[in-house]
Image (cartoon, helix red, strand yellow):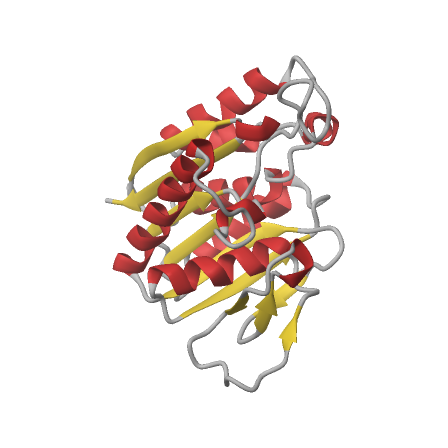
Amino acid sequence: MITRVAIVPYPPLLVPRVAPGDDRQIAELRYAVLGAARWLQQGASRWRAVAADADAPGGYAGLRGSFAGYGAAVDITLSADVPGEAESSESLPLPVLIAGWLREQAGADAVTVDVLDPATAQPDCARAGAALATSEDTALLVLADGSNRHGVKSPGGNDDRAPEFDASIADALRGADADGLARIDPVLCTKLGAAGRVALQVAGGVVGIESRGVVGTRGWDATLHYSAAPFGVGYHVATWEAR
């Protein structure tokens, strides 16, 4: 069963060769994300990951990919066992590429990524999380971005609701609050350009399962390591560990 969960964003700027330089905001974000990934690896060397992508939902494992489409010829693999001659794909979804890059940076053996449709309803997300919670996997990487509408220079343009929206997500992550994550409004997410709802609600299904009597009274220790909106996008980094 899942005993460790790491929640991270997945912007390509996490990769130094994609966004070179010494920008302080990028450095702080990378530090938090890499710290969460290394913490996850300390608990398990083989990870399960969950994300959402409209163009390429499905399961991803044992593949080689590339960030060439983001301006840097940086190859990644989802497993240390992928042959060196395996063909590299630029068409892998961004969260899959980031999951592979984090696997390599943390020294984990492998990551299998479940990419869901962004329109997946909350009850289905909760059921997916419940299934993960009782699977053989012990470490879950959750790839989720917040709103992209923080300020007039943000990718989605300004929306005054974005700060409160991301603050509510930060509060839920700080407390491993399954109910708080379940309440994330999919309609509001669409309006605010928040791509992480589905993955976050799957995570809520993982930690919320004990409230339905399946895992007894197991609780979670949660830490919010980072929550900010550099470059107009809400990013959160948190870790949860089962007691």
Which residue occupies 62% across, 54% down?
A: 94
Front residue (pair 127, 73): 73
* Image quadrant where one finds the N terminus: bottom left
Looking at the image, residue 161 lies above or below residue 61? above
Q: Position of residue 18 (x, y in %)?
A: 56, 52
Please report the residue visible at 62 percent of the width from the left and 29 percent of the height from the top.
Answer: 147
Q: Is residue 210 left or right of residue 57?
A: left
> The C terminus is located in which quarter?
top left
| Relative horizontal placement of residue 192, taking residue 200 as reference (left or right) | right
Q: Position of residue 174 (x, y in %)?
A: 37, 29
- Total marks shown come to 0
Q: Is residue 118 above or below residue 230?
A: below
Residue 215 in view: no
Would you identify the image quadrant in which residue 164 lies? Answer: top right
Q: Confirm whether residue 87 shows in the render.
A: yes
Vertical placement of residue 233 versus 4, above or below: above
x then y, percent, for residue 234? 55, 29
Residue occupying the far top of the picture = 160
60 sits left or right of 103 in the view: right
Give x and y (percent) for residue 120.
69, 46
Residue that extends furthest to the front in the rendered view of this protein: 21
Foreground: 177 or 56? Answer: 56
Q: Quadrant of residue 134?
A: bottom left
Q: Quadrant of residue 66?
A: bottom right
